[in-house]
Image: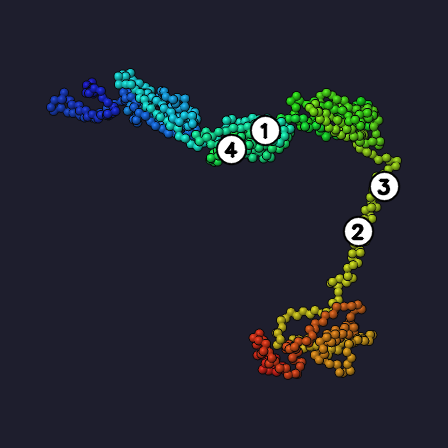
């Protein structure tokens, strides 16, 4: 077995915090280290483990100053402090605590297990006006203390923390966040209900003005005095419509209107007896013709919008006008219901199909209120089990009309209405013209030519002079069975009738119309009734007379067109065409 080499410490009190690792080179020789022996070397790393031989120490000054706003929320972190410990691992773990001072109830300190920091948190709300600063003494202690090193203690350290509360402008605060108030339903307008109170928590102690959030009082039932905070009614109240009003009250600083505090006022409306009881539902009461005396035909109940503290108690009775009737009676069941009973039998629909029974209902309020409700009882034909088959009035067969007779009368009425409609329609049609638009003989022939002409110079396709010249003599076909005798305004000797151009303008049109009328009268194909004649004649009243090239072909007169040169640039083209040539050679 080879001998072992033992490594031992050469110095006492080795300090890991100073040097935690050593590297050794170890040589081994044979022949007991004699000359000529062989040797070998190896490296050995020696690591020192930690012991808790260092206490925690606060590295900052003995007093730590902190400034926090007074609006800091509860459970918020105020600050972090740290005590340094040269040890590592569990030997560096420590606990923090507040030893004394005026802040144990306001602050708390815990250990962050990851960083070993002391975390100071807020336990209660800060109030600058109540206390503006706090002094704390905080101790940090090692959690795991090694008894072998107690002589190096104590293993703790103490520091002082001074917390100063910073003043900020805060909104007004209500003395009570929720104010509960009650008001009677019959309270008159302006009745005071209660008072809210708020104050400015700042040292300035500004005056407060109050107002109601109208989103919580849309119908404006209440008002609040801006200075005193007294809440009063502004409108009549109705508990049945709204029994509880939850108002939000604003408290606004006079010096800084942006600072607004909010409070609540819960107003309960107390009930009064202001509603009379009525039928619970609209009853449909059926009475069989074979009903016997004393039979219950309907059980009625009532409802009341009011809510008395002792509960409802209703009283039922027949109204005075029918209290002594011979047909029905009422029995109060003492349980807020009543029964309607028959007094006799032998009801007949032919005699009276419907009975109307007024019922008086009274409550037990103070003062008592009542209402009269009408119960309609219909007489019905029922089967043996009392199931209604048919209800209401029936017609007497002896004196009434049968169904067939009613149908016949209805048919006659419908027939008369149809006849009246036909007569009116025919009269309207007679007012229309006898000859329809498409059947009228216009006495005009429409000739369609699907070719395009050559303009004014095209004189071969149609005889334009014959179509448009008024002085062309036409030879109409004379009717042999009628001798035309057309009157005229001017009498001319035979063969001496002047041309249209030589006649006065007013005579020209008359003569033209009479001539066309004469042609229509002697036309053998003309119908025996009036027809439409179209007279496409413009007259001859132009100062310059006609400039048409169509008429110029049938005239031999030498027309002087030199005046066209005086009519301006618009007539320059005509002046060039007609000014230097005679009328007969225009189209040559």
Disc 2 packing (10 Å; few <14; some 14–19; many ≥20): few
| Secondary structure type for disc 4 | strand
For the residues bearing labels 3 and 4, Cβ distance under 8 angstroms: no
For the residues bearing labels 1 and 3, Cβ distance under 8 angstroms: no
Which of label 3 and label 4 is nearer to you? 4
> What is the distance, in whole Å, between disc 2 and disc 1 at their CAs?
76 Å
> What is the distance, in whole Å, between disc 4 and disc 2 at their CAs?
81 Å
Read off the residue under disc 2.
Answer: 421
For the residues bearing labels 2 and 1, Cβ distance under 8 angstroms: no
- Residue plotted at (66% across, 21% down): 310
> Which image quarter holds the N terminus?
top left
Read off the residue under disc 1.
Answer: 192
Read off the residue under disc 3.
Answer: 405
Which numbered dot is residue 543?
Answer: none
Read off the residue under disc 4.
Answer: 209
Residue 81: % across, % down: 34, 26
Front-lying residue, 104 or 345: 104
Front-lying residue, 27 or 367: 367
Locate residue 147 relative to residue 308 in the image: left or right: left
């Amino acid at each position: 077995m080879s001998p072992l080499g033992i490594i031992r410490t050469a110095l006492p009190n080795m300090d890991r915090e100073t040097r935690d690792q050593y590297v050794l080179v170890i040589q081994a020789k044979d022949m007991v280290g004699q000359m000529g022996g062989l040797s070998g070397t190896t490296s050995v790393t020696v690591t020192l483990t930690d012991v808790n031989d260092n206490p925690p120490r606060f590295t900052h000054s003995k007093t730590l100053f902190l400034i926090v706003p007074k609006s800091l929320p509860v459970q918020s972190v105020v600050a972090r402090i740290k005590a340094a410990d040269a040890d590592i691992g569990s030997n560096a773990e420590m606990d923090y605590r507040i030893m004394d001072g005026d802040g144990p109830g306001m602050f708390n300190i815990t250990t962050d297990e990851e960083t070993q920091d002391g975390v100071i948190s807020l336990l209660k709300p800060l109030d600058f006006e109540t206390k503006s600063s706090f002094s704390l003494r905080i101790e940090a202690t090692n959690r795991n203390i090694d008894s072998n090193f107690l002589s190096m203690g104590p293993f703790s350290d103490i520091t002082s923390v001074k917390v100063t509360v910073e003043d900020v402008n805060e909104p007004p605060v209500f003395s009570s966040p929720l104010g509960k108030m009650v008001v009677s339903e019959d309270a008159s307008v302006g009745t005071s209900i209660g008072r809210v109170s708020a104050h400015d928590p700042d040292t300035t102690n500004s005056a407060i003005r109050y107002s109601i959030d109208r989103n919580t009082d849309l119908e404006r039932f209440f008002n609040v005095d801006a200075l005193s905070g007294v809440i009063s009614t502004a409108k009549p109240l109705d508990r049945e419509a709204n029994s509880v009003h939850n108002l939000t009250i604003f408290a606004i600083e006079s010096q800084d209107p942006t600072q607004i505090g909010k409070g609540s006022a819960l107003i309960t409306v107390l009930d009064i007896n202001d509603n009379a009881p009525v039928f619970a539902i609209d009853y449909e009461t059926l009475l069989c013709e074979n009903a016997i005396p004393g039979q219950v035909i309907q059980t009625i109940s009532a409802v009341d919008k009011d809510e008395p503290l002792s509960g409802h108690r209703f009283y039922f009775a027949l109204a005075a006008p029918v209290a002594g009737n011979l047909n029905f009676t009422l029995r109060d069941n003492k349980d807020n219901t009543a029964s309607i009973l028959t007094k006799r039998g032998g009801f007949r629909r032919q005699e009276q199909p419907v009975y109307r029974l007024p019922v008086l209902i009274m409550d037990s309020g103070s003062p008592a209120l009542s209402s009269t409700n009408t119960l309609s009882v219909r007489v019905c034909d029922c089967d043996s089990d009392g199931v209604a088959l048919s209800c209401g009035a029936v017609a007497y067969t002896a004196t009434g009309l049968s169904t067939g007779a009613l149908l016949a009368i209805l048919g006659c009425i419908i027939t008369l209405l149809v006849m009246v409609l036909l007569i009116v329609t025919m009269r309207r049609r007679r007012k229309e013209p006898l000859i329809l638009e498409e059947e009228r003989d216009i006495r005009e022939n429409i000739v369609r030519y699907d070719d395009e002409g050559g303009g004014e110079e095209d004189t071969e396709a149609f005889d334009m002079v014959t179509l448009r010249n008024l002085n062309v003599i036409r030879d109409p076909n004379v009717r042999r069975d009628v001798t035309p005798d057309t009157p005229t305004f001017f009498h001319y000797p035979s063969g001496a009738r002047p041309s249209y151009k030589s006649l006065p303008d007013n005579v020209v049109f008359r003569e033209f119309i009479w001539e066309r009328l004469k042609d229509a009268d002697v036309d053998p194909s003309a119908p025996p009734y009036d027809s439409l004649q179209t007279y496409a004649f413009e007259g001859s009243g132009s100062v310059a007379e006609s400039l048409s090239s169509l008429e110029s072909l049938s005239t031999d007169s030498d027309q002087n067109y030199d005046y066209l040169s005086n009519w301006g640039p618009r007539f320059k083209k005509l002046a060039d065409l007609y000014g230097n040539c005679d009328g007969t050679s225009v189209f040559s």
